[in-house]
Amino acid sequence: MKNTLHFYILLLAATLCGANTSIAQTSIIYDDFEGNGTITTWFGDDCGINTNLSNPVQQGNNTSATVLEYHDIGGQYANVRFDVSSNLDLSSHYTFSLKVFIPASGLTGSQPNQVSLKLQDGTIGAPWSTQSEIIKALSLDQWQTITFDFLNDTYINLDGASPPPTQRTDFNRVVIQLNGEDNNDHVLAYIDDVDYDGTVPSDPVFDNLVWSDEFDVDGAINSTNWFHQTQLPNGGSWYNGEIQHYTDRLDNSYVENGILKIVAKKETYTDQGQTKQYTSARLNSKFAFQYGKVEFRAKLPTGVGTWPALWTLGKNVNENGGYWDNEGFGTASWPACGEIDIMEHWGTNQNYVQSATHTPSSYGGTVNLGGQMIATASTDFHVYTLEWSAEKLVFSVDNMVHYTYNPPIKDANTWPFDAEQYILLNVAILPGIDPNFSASNMEIDYVRVYQSFPVSVAHADENPKPSYCPNPVDNELNIILGKVADQDVIVRVYNVDGILVRTHYSYVQNNIISLDDLGFLSQGMYFISYEVDERAYVHKVMKN
């Protein structure tokens, strides 16, 4: 169980002065792997990872129920990592900590027993080139709390010309690696209570479902939501040398048992004066949006030469036969309109999925891409996600982030993503199609688009600052709020060192939160932290 949380300096100063402090637009960085953390982008680089493992060694200074399992079975550069929403400011907050346990039985080879924490810029193609690293020695068969202090500890900059890490502002990725790299030895380890002593600006929260298709009516696709794009746009052929016809027939797209099926098949088919040997479907959404989260739950086709994609184009793209161009919005050519490839998959690389962007600065063979291996891409459903804000594009599969596009300069060349885009679903056929290919489906369970709830500003007299009574407190403390809805609330109590001493699962009832179990606290000052209606509060209380 995580037991520390560092309050940043501004917050502490405000609370010491007796102020009611509302925290907005920032977030702490920690994970206790018991559902209380803020890190959602864990990813294993050539390394097995399980962020919900029952703690197999509940002893020493870590008796928590759940930990992260780190399982390197010979990956040359195996590590686990996470990305943060904005670049870290190490000028005043430069310390990371974690707990780690390495069982001697989980090792092979003779590598030094150590843990390294590396900071990188995860937005570039070679993030390791920006790396700053601290290495700490470990003992086996015991839980240890390890601290990495980028001001006072010895660090290693991969680029010797880089300034000290506390003078840099390009770090947004944290990498944890056990027992070195450039080897094929095995490491089994457990990690818990990952923490950073600062904060970062919070990402927008996209939790308001604004558009979706659950494909819950069998038969033809919902024409209110989708348009069949069938017109050949490029002198009798589709782009990229694709050799299929897209049709609006049920043979190539239909809904069955709650699943949309886009069927690529081998057949002779003539349309628009052109005869081709393959058919498929390409759907345009009749919904366009700017910023939000897009989720597809999909299972991909198989076959060398197949090329399924879940993607978006600018609503302003000038593409003959496209829905929005037909509606009169086509004012920009490609790639000036911007293209976001949320998921692409090639049958020539069966277990790999990729995300990419195409902009005037890099398109076609774009350098702006990233992907990951999905062993069951064509046998199981997976959730492919794009989170699109005014700052960046974040791509993930099943909540595992594999690429972030966040150009430092955002202009028409690098960032045409400040206008509405629409969704496309298709399976293309490439010239190198396996001659034995007959048919294969891309199956989609749902498409969902979320955006942020509109921010509402309450009238001052409806939401006065909370009051805390009695203060000083003996055993029971009442937090009297303004006008809020009844709701569950988690109240955390910290001592002056920022150590969590009590978590209270309570309820707002009639605008009051009641805490009745504070008698165990020693005399002194404490901080009460909680969140109500998406506003976070911290207040100082004194214990008699």
Image (spheres, rainbow, N blue to C red):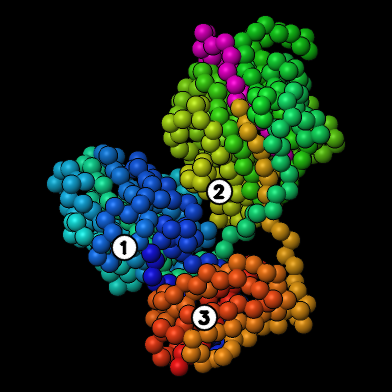
Q: Which residue is mark 2?
A: 394
Question: Who comes first in sequence, dot 3 or dot 1?
Answer: 1
The residue range painted magenta reads 422-442
> Which corner quadrant of the image does residue 306 belong to?
top right
At label 3, which amino acid type do we have? Answer: Asp
Question: Who comes first in sequence, dot 2 or dot 3?
Answer: 2
Q: Is residue 333 visible?
A: no
Q: Residue at x 65, y 36 (%)?
A: 446
Q: Which residue is mark 3?
A: 516
Element type at marker 3? loop
Q: Position of residue 442 (x, y in %)?
A: 60, 25
Q: Which residue is mark 1?
A: 63
Q: Residues within 10 Å of mark 1 (few under 14, many from 20)?
A: some
Q: Is residue 226 left or right of residue 239?
A: right
Above-or-below relation of 213 to 493: above
Q: Residues under labels 3 and 1: Cα distance?
A: 26 Å
Name the residue furthest left. Answer: 110
Above-or-below relation of 428 to 8: above
Quadrant where the N terminus sits is bottom left
